[in-house]
Amino acid sequence: MIPLVKTGEPLFRQVYRSLRQSMVSGAFRGGHRLPSTRDLAEELGISRTVALLAYELLLAEGFVVGRGGSGTYVASSLSAGPSKKHKRSVPLPLSRFGSAAAEAADGASLPGRRAAPLRYDFVWRSDMETFPFEAWRRILLRKARAAPVRAHDYGPAAGTLALREAIAAHLRRSRAVVCDASEVIIVNGSQQALDLIARVLLEHGDTVAVEDPQYQGTREVLLAAGAKLRPVAVDADGMNPANLPAQGARLVFVTPSHQFPTGTILPLPRRLALLDWARRKHAVIVEDDYDGEFHYAGRPLESLQGLDNEGRIVYVGTFSRTIFPALRIGYLIAPKSLASAFTAAKWLSDRHSATLEQQTLAEFIDSGMYERHLRRLRRRNTSRRTALLEAIHKYLGNRVQMTGDGAGVHVVLWLDRRASEKAIIEKAAARGVGVYGVSRYFLRHPRQGLMLGYSRLKEPEIREGIRQLSEII
């Protein structure tokens, strides 16, 4: 009996795939006579047309042969069935990159979707309840209906012009980024941007300066590319440029608007010093502005890229934090001298990002919906941040030190040296409270702390989650 699902994959493809698997596995050997299309249709409760389409695919690929007046048979070339020696997984050689990627996968421990959701999960992800999905669906449907056939052909590697222009205009207004559409490359999330940066700008063995602690996705990309990492400790004001390598570093990766994970903000004197270091060392700065849209205390500092007058900064951004992660659209702003190289690298990687979603996002931004959505997000995040800070002050007091409350959508609670980060996380989860460790983000001298995102929790949930946490710490 062939299991069929009424939604998703077409029925004829399901029938074809199931029969083909039976032939490949040896369940149907060469010369085996298949039921007639009429009998198969009756047995499965499908139309005979569905059965005919499945058989035609098998015939076209050589899995079956038709014998006039006799029926359809499994091709004799499949008579031997699969070789038993191939049932086990044979170890195959990996490239240097493949080996590094496998090691990175073993060490990755980013928060995933929990098997059993926690009642008070302080995960640091976007607030999807606020997003206007109905408006998004209407735009997407209209774009799909109006698109001519040629619009479904391959698109430009750098992304559709409409979206690149919309992003450039928005960034000029909101983040003081100095760019035009020719410098914008659309990518499949900021992670692809980081991968392309490593491929385009690094050779195996090159030295790269990174914040310590730093975003795990950046670290693993650089290690997979064979870079030698030079960690620069982060203090209350972020990375100190005075501690950058005196020589040899080709790149430096920073998160100046809300350092990940500590949440510190790089002040203007250090930003200028960082630019001066890059000029003197002829280095490139990679600015990851992953949640620069959110700032709460005082006037937000504009992008580091906006201060650069030599074209030394590659600026990375994403819509995963402001729209929804499954969209998988991010961007990098490349200096004009590097734009063509990044565009070619994007083409080599995957030709281009999905065009229909790009068109939808372009209209979403141009229509003003995106900025209205950001204003709603900021208001909600401000309210939730206030509830979080009040709860921490009330229930935890001076038992923890806090950083990161001036921007972004997460804070870090630094623990006493005698506390156990792992034990607290496990005990909190047992009470239905999700908190996440910080120590794994360090390359040197790890500190114990808890990272708490607040964009997905309502104010009463935040207060109760912190109260529960206070009983553990």
Image (tube, helix red, strand yellow):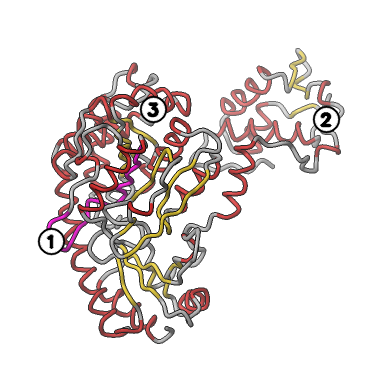
Q: Is residue 112 left or right of residue 298?
A: right
Q: Amino acid at mark 3?
A: Phe
Q: Amino acid at mark 1?
A: Gly
Query: Quick check: marks 1 and 2 in contact, CB under 8 Å?
Result: no
| Nearer to me, 228 or 339 | 228
The tally of labels here is 3
Residue 342: assigned label: 3
Instruction: Check disc 3: other Cα within 10 Å, few if <14, some if 14-19, many if 20+.
Output: many
Tag of residue 2: none
Give residue 45's position: percent from left, percent from top. 59, 38
Sequence-wise, the earlier of marks 1 and 2 is 2
- Residue 285 on the magenta segment: yes
Q: What span is in magenta?
A: 284-300
Look at the image and say whether residue 311 sits in the magenta stretch. Answer: no
Between disc 3 and disc 2, the foreground one is: 3
Q: CA distance from mark 1 to mark 3?
A: 36 Å
The quarter in which the N terminus is drawn is top right
Question: Which label was assigned to residue 29?
Answer: 2
SS under mark 1: loop
Residue at the spot x=38%, y=41% of the render?
Answer: 189
In this rendering, would 39 be left or right of 462? right
